Amino acid sequence: MEMPVPDKGVLSRKAQIVARLRTALPADAVIDATAETLAYECDALTAYRCPPMAVVLPRTTQEVSAALSICHEEEVPVVPRASGTSLSGGALPTADCVILGTSRLTDVLETDYDNRFIRVQTGRTNLSVSGAVEENDFFYAPDPSSQLACAIAGNIAMNSGGAHCLKYGVTTNNLMGVTLVLMDGTVVELGGAHLDAGGLDLLGVICGSEGQLGVVTEATLRILRKPEGARPILMGFDSNEIAGACVADIIKAGIMPVAIEFMDRPILELVEDFAKAGYPDCEALLIVEVEGSDDECDAQLARIKDIANRHNPVELREAADEDQAARIWLGRKSAFGAVGRVADYICLDGTIPIAELPNVLTGMRSLSEKYGLKVGNVFHAGDGNLHPLIMFDANKPGDLELCEAMGADILRLCVDLGGCLSGEHGVGVEKRDLMLDQFTHDDLEAQMQVKDVFDPKWLLNPAKVFPLSLTLSRREARQ
């Protein structure tokens, strides 16, 4: 995987740059010792590593502005980093960059239950946002699997979703406003505590921009009343294709569950051994959750069970109480850890139209046989956001490259079936070189011109999202 050659001029001025940062920021906010920068050498895509030149950990928007202003003047690349849970290499450093971490930006700044919003610093973890309002029976809807650790800054950068995004939407549907610091240190406010902002939808441009346009330090988020109740149902089927067809039929029927999660046999075997969730012996399993009053849940589940029965399920199991509901979800929440016990893996993030689920699952089986690598599927089936886990041996020469080639073919399959390269993990470096499989050169040029406006020197996360061959002239213009 290619990365830009570090700028020797920047590296030669490291002492000067670090000294300027230390003058502008608190003493403990700047890290440049090699042993300490190793903690920031990668994110959750751990196959690629590179220690940064330095790390800054500001506590306020003003400190972020000061750090960026210095790096802009010194023409130092900056890689924004939240909690480092990115699965696409979105926070992978280069040797000549400064990592700007948001982990100390953790305050709740304002809570308004009447108008249903909370304003937080963006280093705050996803789960702790709900934690801040749960005593008043509110919650923040987007719930990535890493919500215990991932931060709002990263959620905004990658437009993260989660199991319940089918009903409540992903981050962009729950983001009302941001405080954004541009690369030159300028602080701007976009959106706010109102339903919609006038003028251009710049908030929509920022959400999902992968830290390429600015650093989000504060966010105004929509909070919702907790539902009266929620109830999951477990459904086992004889094949992936039948389970996929069942998902398509539920959506076509106009039913809107809060979540539809999918697991296939390779995943089921691993999670059952790990979590002992008591899942049935089947080829594919769906977890469908509905919410509302008891009568509403009963009515929705009756329709869902009717659809499932047309596909001859191996088992239908409806949760009768909270303990049974927790056991139904136990294996799904344990899936990634269960796979990590037995193999190295890469977790992909392609998205497809719901009706194509049977076709993409068949295609993935063929690719698994072609490459000789095991693939397990665990994903948000309701909105077609796939998370195939390709298992390999990192200690076996050539296995990583084989895994990457198979992953690229799976993502191309998603695009060929009318889908896209990413649903919530982002492009980062993982999918960067596949962008031309989804977009034309003119498409990408239009996107890069947006970055030109926000970051003319191409200093913010410059090695991500776009193929390096297309960004070379822009990156070299500042050297």
Image (cartoon, rainbow, N blue to C red):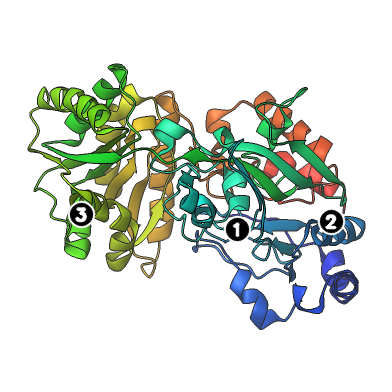
Residue with the mark numbered 3: 323
x and y percent of residue 391 in the render? 32, 56
Can I make out residue 351 in this image? no
Q: Residue at x 21, y 64 (%)?
A: 274
Quadrant in the picture for residue 74:
bottom right
Mark 3 in CB contact with mark 2 (< 8 angstroms): no
* Mark 3 vs 2, N-terminal side: 2
Give the mark toward the camera: 3 or 2.
Answer: 3
Q: Residue at x 76, y 73 (%)?
A: 29
Left or right of 303 on screen, residue 363 = right
Q: Residue 65, labelled with which disc?
A: 2
Q: Residue 124, labelled with which disc?
A: 1
* Mark 3 vs 1, N-terminal side: 1
Left or right of 376 on screen, residue 36 = right
Residue type beneath disc 2: Ser
Find the residue positioned furthest to the top.
Answer: 253
Q: Residue at x 40, y 29 (%)?
A: 352
* Mark 1 vs 2, N-terminal side: 2
x and y percent of residue 447 in the render? 70, 31
Residue type beneath disc 3: Asp
Inter-mark Cα distance, 1 to 2: 19 Å
Q: Secondary structure at mark 1?
A: loop
